[in-house]
Image (cartoon, grey):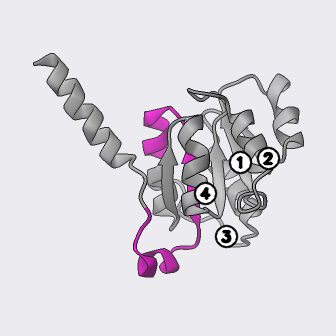
Amino acid sequence: MRRSRRRDRDIGLARELSIFRPPRPLLDALRNFMGFIDDDEHLLLGLTARLKANGYAVVCASDAVTAISVARKHVPDLIILDLGLPAGDGFLVLERMRTLADLVSIPVVVLSARDPADNKKRALDAGAAAYFQKPPDNHEFLMAIRRALGETVALSTFLKT
């Protein structure tokens, strides 16, 4: 019984975090489309909800293997990338993105629990637009996303959940 509940929970979470793209009319009404690559399901759910509350569409991936295929399939306007991913790390994803013509111009905001003293410079040198330590400050995080997207919209409802 315990296994089936865990399996049901995992299937429910997989549906919640599934790779999806909203219908085109809805997507056109939204400001931007984001890829969020992180293996922390709670962070994915929380920040995805906040991003959606601000009018962003979000597609998620939870490991390095699917990150590139998700990015190539959906070509988001921005990618939020964790460095500590299963099946490879975020630096590998970032370096691979920078070699693919269809992904090279997508801004990347790194969101990591790793020590910034060792990783921030490396991430920025690899092409990241910004680096944030987990958990990020909501205001600063959204402002960095908007800067990376070239938006000048005033900070409004990011604190909504």
* Residue 28 painted magenta: yes
How far, Cα to Cα, is label 3 from label 4? 30 Å
Three-letter code, disc 3:
Ala
Classify residue 155 as left or right of residue 128: left
The answer to the question of whether label 3 and label 4 lie on touching residues, with beta carbons closer than 8 A, is no
- Front residue of 150 and 85: 85
The answer to the question of whether label 3 and label 2 lie on touching residues, with beta carbons closer than 8 A, is no
Q: Nearer the viewer, mark 3 or mark 4?
A: 4
Q: Which residue is mark 4?
A: 72
Q: Which residues are magenta?
A: 21-47
Q: Could you tell me residue 24's position as x and y percent?
A: 45, 78
User: Could you tell me how many numbered marks the image carries?
Assistant: 4
The mark nearer the N terminus, 3 or 2, is: 2
Classify residue 137 as left or right of residue 62: right
The mark nearer the N terminus, 3 or 1, is: 1
The answer to the question of whether label 4 and label 1 lie on touching residues, with beta carbons closer than 8 A, is no
The mark nearer the N terminus, 4 or 1, is: 4
**Mark linked to residue 109:** 1
Binning the other alpha carbons within 10 Å of mark 2 as few (below 14), some (14 to 19) or many (20 upward) gives: many
Q: Nearer the viewer, mark 2 or mark 4?
A: 4
Q: Could you tell me residue 100's position as x and y percent?
A: 75, 54
Three-letter code, disc 2:
Ala
Q: Identify the image quadrant of residue 20.
A: bottom left
Three-letter code, disc 1:
Val
Q: Nearer the viewer, mark 3 or mark 2?
A: 2
**Mark linked to residue 154:** 3
